Image (tube, coloured by chain):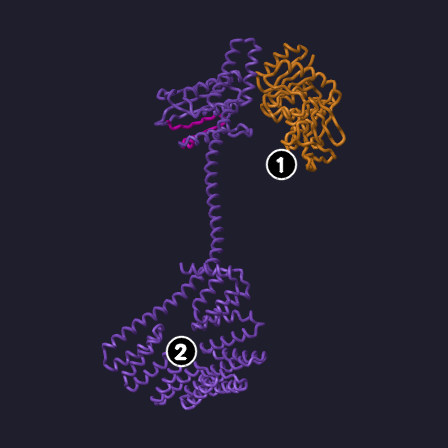
Amino acid sequence: MIKTIIIEDEVNVRNALRKMLTILEPSINVIAETGYVKDAVKLIKTEKPDLVFLDIELEDGTGFDVLRQLDVDFSIIFTTAYNQYAINAFKFSAIDYLLKPLDPTELQESIVRAKQQIKNKKEHKELLNSLLNNIEKKEKKIVLKTTEQHFVFYVKEIIRLEADGAYTIFVTKNKKIIISRNIKYYQDILGDGFVRCHQSHLVNLKYILSMNKNGFLQLSNNELIIVSTRKKSEVIRLMNKE
Amino acid sequence: MKILFIYFLTFSTSVSFGQKKILDYLKANYESAPTDVIIHVDSLLAYNKNYNKAAVAEIKYYQAFAYQKIKNHKKSLEIFNEILPFFKKNDIKKIKILLNQSNSNTYLANYTDAANQALEVLNLAKKIKQNKYIVSANNALSFIYYSNKDYTKAFDYLSNTVTLALKEKDSVRLSATYNNIAIIYKSMANFKQALLYNKKSLEISFLIKDNEGIGKSYSNIGRLYELFGKYDKAVEYYVKAIKNNEEIKLLNSIPYANIGEVFLIKKNYAKATENFLKAVKIEKTNTKSAQNIYSSLLKTAIKQKDFEQALIYQTKFDSLYNINIKAQNEEQIKMLKNQHKLFKSKEEIVQYKSINIKNRIIFGILTGLLILLGLYWYQSTRNKVLKNEKEKLSLEQTVLRSQMNPHFIFNALSAIQNSLLDNDTIKSATYLSRFAKLIRQNFDFINQKSISLAEEIDALKNYLDTQKLRFQDKFNYEINIFSDVDVNLVEIPPLLIQPFIENAIEHGFKNKKEQGKIILNISKEKNKICYEIKDNGLGQLSAKNDGKTHSTDIFKKRIKLLGKKDEDSFVINTSKKGTTIKFCLTQV
């Protein structure tokens, strides 16, 4: 049996989640529920659950407030109704989350992954740390997961991204990593500080030295990156904004 | 028009004939037509900017002579002073200029300057060994002292001349010098010596067959005899002069007039009249001389008591006087006009340029300012309009968002999901359709300025019911509409009340354990409809500010945009026991 606690302020969501879990995953045993940060910390410390459903918006704070007060050695499934800031942090840290109202299929999948988290505690902790780091507005870290392993980089370390079909190649000073997500996904979460100078290229503005007369960007790692004609003026504008 | 014609002529001559021709013209005319020369030069210089300074000096040289000719010594001096530096290497011209300057200065009684200039001529002439200019310089110096009534010094210089002229056998200058000596003696009332020198001059004139000089000498001698009171002798010499003049076919009225004067003194009026008439005949065309002679004729007629004749002479005299005055005036006016015109045209060109530049700058600045002002005005009105529009749009969106708050939507949907999982199909269907209605109303209202109160209340009920489902009947609500309020006629901006209801639920009831209650009262006060929203929550202001614009601010802005100043009627009382909000809206 998986000892589970639901931390959620909406009664309806709590009830619905419990009912769905009963139907989908009989192995999950919900031992406690609360909508308050204070109660949540206490409950987790005393009950030592295997899995926690953690909502971002709570009555007296956020789900992150709960995590900060604990040494996490349990699996977490984050839930949120609508919090763009938190969602962006999840994406940066490659952490799963569920949107309300909950989709039963997604719920099931996330439970499967949560079970794996228990096996790979080290990675799980690392991801959570990067999440809390990103939430606290420190120097942002991005987690890149491949099928075999994961990498954590400071965003400032990323020189550029290159599209390769549905994959994206990350280029840092000394690494090239292929991730199975499209470049648009990363363009959205990386946001300012990067420029999509070409259909296939997203470049960190910090690494642009100049634009040569043939319309190529000279990067500080000696690479030349093509700029599409349409994007030229925007690139120049952003280069000078830096 | 005349001036224009002159300019045209000037322009064309300067272009087609060249400077040589112009100088020839000026040289030929400065004595006979000084005024024309002056005007011509002014025009030339005003309209031909391409002359170099030396060429300008050459041209002005003749203008200065012309000015001297019309006895404008000041102007003449001015020009000579100006152009003198350009003739440093041309000694002859320099001498000529200096001589004329000296002459003018003598007239203007600037004797020191005049003497200095004459002495300079003397030195120059000695240097280049030009005796005739040495004579001229001596004559000039003599004239200066004569003018200064220093006759001794005047004689000294003239004696120098005599010596030189004799040495040079320059009879012409010797004759002229003797005449000058005679003049000085005459001025000193030493008529005898004067007569002597006039006779010497006459002798020379005979020798060199200078008939004109002979005539002049006869006249001068006659004048001296007249002064002696030897009228017969005087007449004799005058007659000699007349005869001499006749021989050389020189028409000269002076001897006749002089004879006339003598006969007048001798009271021989008939002879006097006869000679005066002869003189007048000669001077028919010379109005000035004729005027003087008529004056004498008039005197004679009056002496004769021939008043009829006197009247005729008087009339003649008057008409000539008028003609002369008129001519004099015309000449003066002509000069003045020309000066004025040239001055103006020169000044105008300069001024016009500067004015033009100034005007352009001023015009540019003014236009710029006007454009800027216009742009500013346009922009500010446009900005106002845009700002208003933008404000409205952003308000509308805020209002829409406040009802369609994502938390509210997703949590409401979660509530429906929960009821579905309970297998309560009718309840689920009801809530789902109520939620759909809420979204539909939102779509409908957002583009409307106002809706009926009935519609607003309907939307509120939907909202409240949906929230009740979400909060599992944690609160109740009550809507009381007073009977004098016709909900179908009263107009209200859409979703105006809803944000206050939302605040009551989301903030007022959140941490409240007991049952919540919301009461909405709608009543009529005069021409206003008043809304009162009461709740028994924990107080709306105690709720933490999550960074979103406060609903009260949005409300006030919306009311302000209606322009009825109803925003001041807004009152809010909030405590831990509950919140009461009241506001009234003017009805049209």
Residue designated by label 2? B250
Subunit bearing disc 2: B
Subunit bearing disc 1: A
State the image quarter where residue A67 is shown.
top right
Q: Which of B63 and A212 is in front in this view?
A: B63
**Placement of B34 over or under B577, stated as above or below:** below
Quadrant in which the N terminus of chain B is drawn: bottom left
Which x, y percent locates residue B372? 48, 43
Chain B hue? purple
- What residue type is disc 2 on? Leu
**Placement of B588 over or under B475, stated as above or below:** below
Residue designated by label 1? A237
Chain assigned orange: A
Q: Distance between the residues labelled 1 and 2?
A: 101 Å
Which x, y percent locates residue A219? 71, 35
- What residue type is disc 1 on? Arg
Residue B47 is a magenta residue: no
Give, as a single range, the part of the protein colored magenta.
B565-587
Say left or right for B499 vs A182: left
Which x, y percent locates residue A98? 63, 19
